[in-house]
Amino acid sequence: MVKQVYPRVEINLQYLKENVAEIVRRCGEFGIDIAGVIKGTTGIPECAKMFEEGGAKIIASSRLEQIEDAKNYGIDLPYLLLRVPMMTELAEVVRLTDISLNSEVKVLKALNEEARKQDKKHKVILMADLGDLREGFWDKDEMVDAALMVEKELTNLELAGVGTNLGCYGSIEATSDKLDELVAIAERIEGKIGRTLEYISGGATTSLPRIINNDMPKRINLLRVGEGILLARDLDVFYGYDMSFMHQDVYTLKAEVIEVKDKPSHPVGKISIDAFGHTPEYVDRGIRKRALLGIGKVDYGSIDEIFPKDKGIEVIGASSDHTILDIEDAERNLEPGDIVSFGINYASIVYLTNCRNVQMIFV
Ligand SMILES: *Cc1c(COP(=O)(O)O)cnc(C)c1O
């Protein structure tokens, strides 16, 4: 096996645990449990463990292989599948998870059959689409009927509750009005089944503002939080919330300099297309000092999603395996073998933690 030292992502597990504990504590004050969502960090078991130690009540992911890894690592919490299941993965859903989010009657029936085969009781949370237009029942009468069917006919399923997801496709904000709609659906179902639902799951990181603003509808009792714990950047950058009570530097990307030279800033010759078939704008700033890094778009996605920690360093471009920095105004002198650090966000962490040539180092 090749021994590669860089690029690497350094993960501060103590900070991660403290972030989990902080969100668990704040939501706990509102009677809300946290399902810790590990998909943003590709389910790295050491990170999943911090969700357990920080007080999350459930471990959640959209991907079964991450759930299997966490279980094998010995994390002893209920497991929740976030992506509504594929028909072809139901046996594994029942084997590996305790709860799944669902939106299709056909799938619920097959899931019940599979749970019967495995002699298990599997919990389901029915998803309501409140306008974000990804998964979930759009017709709420159909949703109530499905809930009644689960309750009365699908004896190997347990109707654990209802949930919704906002701010993913349709960019719809998780306002208290939207979450009131979810509570109303839950109460309609409760009226018909004559008991209280275990969970009313009011969304993801994008629902945390309701905690911060103190306007979360009372009956919401479960949030599924990933980004707001792992990075705590989105609410800060996109919504303007002061998230300084969280560690925003759990993850640090480090890459190695492989070339430093003075070169023109405008390409020399006939311009056609770059490595990905595009023609970016090249600004002519004359001869500039630049550094080349041994990391590229294959590792992190887009240069807009990595943020140099050094003042005066600018990312000016990249191809699959190379990243080009303008270091003319850098405060330190770089040479081959030096290391440059970056903050990352959700759009880059998902690639970096998935990339087998990027080392994960726990600090
Ligand atoms: C990804 C996901 C979450 C967690 O989202 P974050 O923004 O990381 O908090 C919650 N629920 C569902 C259904 C998801 O797919």
Image (tube, rainbow, N blue to C red):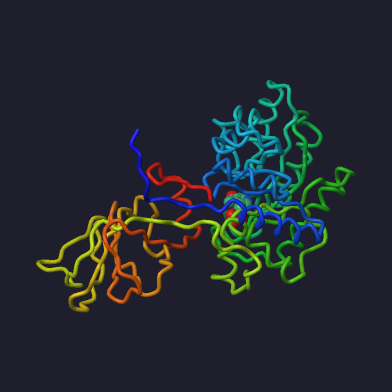
Instruction: Name which residue lies at 62% across and 49% down.
Output: 37
Q: As displayed, is residue 111 above or below residue 239?
A: above
Give whichever of 224, 286 is nearer the camera. Answer: 286
Whether residue 16 is visible, yes or no, is yes
**Percent coordinates x, y for residue 163 in the rendering:** 71, 51
**Percent coordinates x, y for residue 297 in the rendering:** 34, 54
- Judge from the rendering whether residue 63 lies leftward or rightward of residue 299; answer left or right: right
In which quadrant of the rendered view does residue 66 lie? top right
Whether residue 135 is visible, yes or no, is no
Quadrant in which the N terminus appears: top left
**Percent coordinates x, y for residue 277 in the rendering:** 24, 57
Q: As displayed, is residue 198 above or below residue 259?
A: above
Q: As displayed, is residue 263 above or below residue 70?
A: below
Instruction: Name which residue lies at 64% across and 47% down.
Output: 50
Instruction: Name which residue lies at 43% across and 67% down.
Output: 309
Give whichever of 214, 93 is nearer the camera. Answer: 214
In the picture as drawn, the residue positioned furthest to the left comes out as: 269
**Percent coordinates x, y for residue 260 in the rendering:** 23, 63
- Judge from the rendering whether residue 38 lies leftward or rightward of residue 139; answer left or right: left
In the picture as drawn, the residue positioned furthest to the bottom comes out as: 285
Give whichever of 305, 262 is nearer the camera. Answer: 262
